[in-house]
Image (spheres, rainbow, N blue to C red):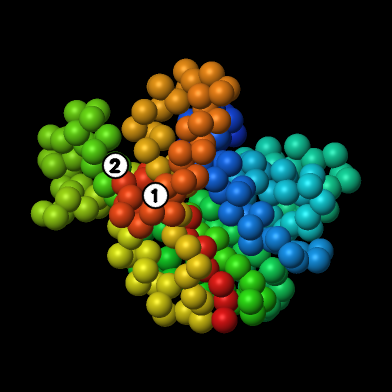
Amino acid sequence: MNYLEDYYNHYDEDGRLLSRHGQVEYLTTMKYIHECLSGLSAPTILEVGAGTGRYCVTLARQGYRITAVELIAHNLDLLKAKLDGTEPLTALQGNAMDLSFLPDHAFDLTMLLGPMYHLYTRENKHKALAEAVRVTKRGGYILVAYCMNEPTVIQYVFGMNHLHEVMDLHMLTPDWHCVSEPKDLFEMVRTEEIASPDAEFPVKRIKLVATDGATNYKREYIDAMDDDTFAKWMDYHFTICERQDLIGASHHTLDILQKI
């Protein structure tokens, strides 16, 4: 069974990012995308694992030239349905671990905002990162998103009362690291695991950012906020999202790398 394809054939990813709590991750990611693009004249962008196009379609409508690669045919169909033909966006089906149809040193910005969620071995993660580095220009940026371990333990294992279930299924190591395989859909990491592959490629880390921080712990409160209060929450979030003492507690992180 293709667990990933079955999941995304029925999951509303756009709806998640359009919710108020989902907007925190989206707005934060867009903030750092634009930081990487600032000062560049006519930059070229690659999004690998583009999903239904929440990021790439928005950027294309802002005038950026985008190549979007997506593994799941259903997602790719939804992405293409959003286009009216005027956007400078090319959408292709492909796998993050094999971008051989794309040339070396071609893009100013390469984004992997989803693939690392679904790669379960060190070897496969390295393949995806190696391909992203290969197709990025020297001096260009690579943005890589991850799902973090500790929020899953806190919210899912304890908060949603799944402790005995996951222990019976041997889904936790003695040091409380989540153990995932394809049927579990998502791979959880810790900050030290993000740092390890970064050190093996010709890149330097610019920032590691908590893209949603404390938001998902209090999503019902975030969703109920009025506009003024939510604006204050975003101000608070942007103030603390680069604090390294808080990174591991965020549900999602964004590793910002520069190719050297």
Residue 188 in the figure: left or right of residue 125: left
Q: Is residue 191 above or below residue 63?
A: below
Residue drawn at point x = 72 percent, y = 45 percent: 57
Q: Residues within 10 Å of mark 1 (few under 14, many from 20)?
A: many
Which numbered disc, 1 or 2, marks the residue that appears first in the sequence? Answer: 1
Spot occupied by residue 256 in the image (x, y as percentages of width and height):
52, 63
Question: Residue 127: image x %, image y %?
Answer: 48, 71
Disc 1 element: strand
Indicate the quadrant where residue 61 lies: top right
Query: Which residue bears the numbered disc 1?
Result: 147
Quadrant that contains the C terminus = bottom right
Q: Quadrant of the N terminus?
A: top left
**Residue 185 appearing in the image:** no
The disc at residue 152 is 2
Give the amino acid type for the residue marked by disc 1 in the picture: Cys
| Residue 158 seen in render | yes
Which of 162/209 is in front?
A: 209
Residue at (19% x, 28% y) in the render = 161
> Which residue is nearer to you in this view: 182 or 85?
85
Q: Residue at x 63, y 58 (%)?
A: 35
Residue 186 position, x and y percent, is 38, 47
Q: Indicate the amino acid at tag 2.
A: Thr
Q: Counting other residues with Cα less than 10 Å from the Cα at mark 2, is it few (<14), some (14-19), or many (20 or more)?
A: some
Q: Nearer the viewer, residue 52 or 30?
A: 30
Task: State the CA–CA distance, disc 1 to disc 2.
Answer: 9 Å
Which residue: 33% across, 50% down?
246
Tell me the SS state at disc 2: helix
- Image coords of residue 230 (percent x, y): 52, 27
Q: Mark on residue 188?
A: none
Number of numbered callouts drawn: 2
Q: Name the image quarter holding residue 123.
A: bottom left
- CB of mark 1 within 8 Å of CB of mark 2? yes
